Amino acid sequence: MNGIKNTLNKLFKLKSPKTGIYLIEKNSHENSLIEEDKNDIDNCSTFYPIKYPFLDNIDQDYNLSIVLDMDETLIHFKNLDENGKGILRMRPGLNEFLDKLLELNCEIILFTASTQSYADVIINEIESEKKYFSYKLYRHHTILINNEFVKDISKIGRDLKKVIIIDNSEVNFSLQKENGILIKSFFGDDEDDTSLYNLSYILENIIKKGFIDIRKELHKYKSDIEAKVTSNE
Ligand SMILES: [Mg+2]
């Protein structure tokens, strides 16, 4: 096992956790294994209702709360074997994007429909310094609608006038479409992808101009978002 790992490490020349391609073992994070993970499809709040609001009240006056999807939005993970070994690729501009959100006084909430045991390994690679994500929400925070995991952001405990959800799957934010930004899926093979750069530019514009209800602003920027973030051609 170690032999394979060493070979892969050399092959991909592991870089710092902030960028590039590197090898992880998604089952290595034993502490995060939770009971619900044992049932893969059923472990959402439809079957295991959990108390909401999910987040604590905030005393800080953020400009926006940004709810970020993980897989194919921020990263792509490709399985190499059935033991959880795989290749993780960060989307181009990921760290610049997250740094920009902090600079713009945004609260960053990671909300993935993946299981916690898998997601925590990835999250630890994205933010080894633990400076980006104020909260992390997982599959057990989603609800199942028509066999799809849906993220109901009315349950997070934030004023929806100041919440954006960014996801590569429209279904994930189908309950609050007006808060959603659909981002092109990232499958780890496009080094020229500029979606996150374009998105941070749009968000910076919106925040610097000021707004009352982010849902109205997203509507105004709809064509810009579709061209630069959703299709990113
Ligand atoms: Mg996704």
Image (cartoon, helix red, strand yellow):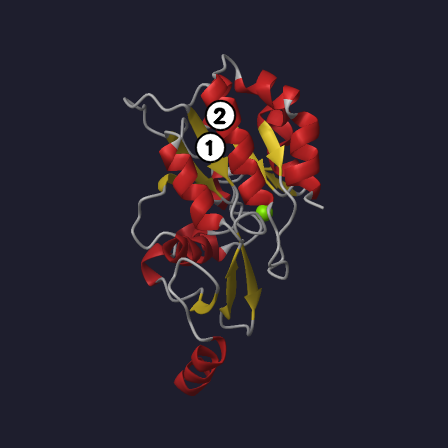
- State if disc 2 and disc 1 touch (CB < 8 Å): yes
Residue furthest to the top: 212
Q: Answer left or right for 30 relative to 205.
A: left
Mark 1: few/some/many CA within 10 Å (<14, 14-19, 20+) = many
The residue at 64%/19% (across/down) is 220
Q: Residue furthest bottom?
A: 3
- Indicate the position of residue 195 as horizontal and vertical percent values: 60, 44
Task: Name the residue rendered at 39%, 84% in the picture.
Answer: 2
- The N terminus, quarter of image: bottom left
Is residue 142 among the parts visible in the rendering?
yes
Tally the marks: 2
Q: Which residue is mark 2?
A: 163
Secondary structure found at label 2 = strand
The image quadrant that residue 179 belongs to is top right
Per the image, the residue denoted by label 1 is 66
Image vertical order of residue 32 relative to residue 178, above or below? below
Q: Position of residue 232 (x, y in %)?
A: 68, 44
Question: Is residue 46 in view?
Answer: no
Q: Is mark 2 within 8 Å of ligand 1?
A: no
Q: Secondary structure at mark 1?
A: strand
Vertical relation: 170 (above or below) 88: above
The Cα–Cα distance between marks 1 and 2, rounded to whole angstroms, is 6 Å
Q: Nearer the viewer, residue 195 or 42?
A: 195
Q: Residue at x 60, y 16 (%)?
A: 216
Q: Residue at x 29, y 51 (%)?
A: 129
